[in-house]
Amino acid sequence: MRDLARGGEAVLDTERGIVLAAGALPGEKVRLGDVGRDGGTLRGEVQRVLVSAPERVEPACARVARCGGCPWMIATLDAQQAWKQRFVAEAVGDAAVQVALVATGEPLGYRRRARLVFQAGRAAGGKDARLGYRARRAHTVVDAPDCAVLAAPLAAALASVRELLLKALAGEGEVYLAASLRGDAPGAVVVLTSESVQPPAVFTACAALAALPGIAGVALQAGGASAPAVWGEPRERMLGSDGLPLIGTVHGFSQAHAGVNDALVAHVVRLAEPAGQRVLELYAGHGNLTVALAPGAASLVAVENDAAAAAACRENVVARGLRDVRVVAGDAAAYEGGAVDVVVLDPPRTGARDVLASVAGRKPARIVYVSCDTATLGRDVKALRALGYAPDAAVALDMFPQTAHVEAVVRFAPTPARPRPGAGASGKG
């Protein structure tokens, strides 16, 4: 085996050329089957491990080989984190910038949000219905009666959905689970989406689900409905890094690992140094970073394209009595605004290519970039270098143990201007 690809697959040298396959680790020899072309890439399945790497361990879940959720559960946690640290370092592309590794909290039972897929059964009574995760690189649903990486409130919610809802569901769709406080107690919200019209029994089951002690709210949007049916409070409500409630949205984005998220927020604030500064935050979401950056800042403008998330961000700011904060519902690339000292951006997986020229044009003293994809991070690092900014600090955070995904925080500072040819000469012969 030659290396690991950014998606976590093994890069294997074979007689047919380079093949990508999940289920192998660096230093191993494996036997492949079902090798085929996927676009311009050869992919295969590991049939048997002939020579094992010392990093290989027995996975905590028996479905690892079939389910696409946790492909790195076959490796030690130390090995996983070393590979992720390397991915971030390669994206930063500067040996002088030491990438710090942050790993805190549990590697199992940590996920406070998850997206599952359901397929209604064809047998009488829905006995063959499935609720689980997509198989690796396939449409097939791997049924998951339980899941080793779900936090306790989500594990309980999954069991309740399977018991009350699964046999009644029609067609296909998604079940989104997210940790959410019910009063002061840990709980979960459940959001179901489907293009199929759902029978009355599903609505009755949703009401029964919402009445359970561990369920904060349920939402169902199906059959082309313009708005979801709602029971309880399906907006996420969790504790922010400041220990105060942080309101999210229905089926919105939130970080998966509570402990690592707290570390993420702390590192963003440390690198941004917002005290006394004019801060611009792009892709602000519901305010996970906003409420930590705002205290002490001279001013803060938070820009978020999703109207519901922007409204939640505004609600969280107001609840904390934070002043000199303005939340703008709009496209980050279209925001004009005035001069700033610090820019913080937390774009989606596709990166921030559309805003980088505008960000650099504001000439901030610092740019802090939060990334969940090292491929687009590497691309955007190169773009910022061309715009006069270079990385000077970086952190890799293991937000998603057992997977190849890694969260990164990179700070950029202006690069010194190069003197023009002949500058400083007297001009006398």
Image (tube, grey):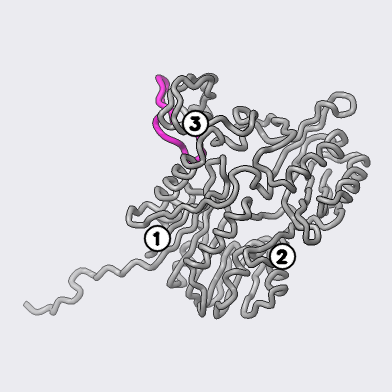
Write down the region rendered in magenta. Answer: 1-18
How far separated are the C-alphas under marks 3 and 2? 40 Å
* Label 3 Cα neighbours within 10 Å, binned few <14 / some 14-19 / many ≥20: some
**Front residue of 346 and 76:** 76
Q: Which mark is residue 245?
A: 2
Tell us which disc is closer to us: 2 or 1: 2
Give the residue drawn at x 62%, y 80%: 324
Q: Which mark is residue 56?
A: 3
Q: Is residue 281 magenta?
A: no
Q: Could you tell me if residue 245 is visible in this image?
A: yes
The picture quadrant where one finds residue 124 is: top right
How far separated are the C-alphas under marks 2 and 1? 33 Å
- Looking at the image, residue 166 sits to the left or right of residue 42; the answer is right
How far separated are the C-alphas under marks 3 and 1? 34 Å
Task: Name the amino acid type tagged 2.
Answer: Pro
Q: Position of residue 8 (x, y in %)?
A: 51, 37
Q: Could you tell me if residue 331 is visible in this image?
A: no
Tell us which disc is closer to us: 3 or 1: 3
Q: Which mark is residue 126?
A: none
Q: Are marks 3 and 1 in contact (CB under 8 Å)?
A: no
The picture quadrant where one finds residue 291 is: bottom right
Name which of mark 3 and mark 1 comes first in the sequence: 3
Q: Position of residue 123 (x, y in %)?
A: 85, 24
- Looking at the image, residue 247 sits to the left or right of residue 205; the answer is left
User: What residue does disc 1 label?
Assistant: 391
Name which of mark 3 and mark 2 comes first in the sequence: 3
Tell us which disc is closer to us: 3 or 2: 3
Q: Are marks 3 and 2 in contact (CB under 8 Å)?
A: no
* Label 1 Cα neighbours within 10 Å, binned few <14 / some 14-19 / many ≥20: many
Q: Position of residue 10 (x, y in %)?
A: 47, 32
Q: Secondary structure at mark 1?
A: strand
Give the residue drawn at x 46%, y 37%: 5
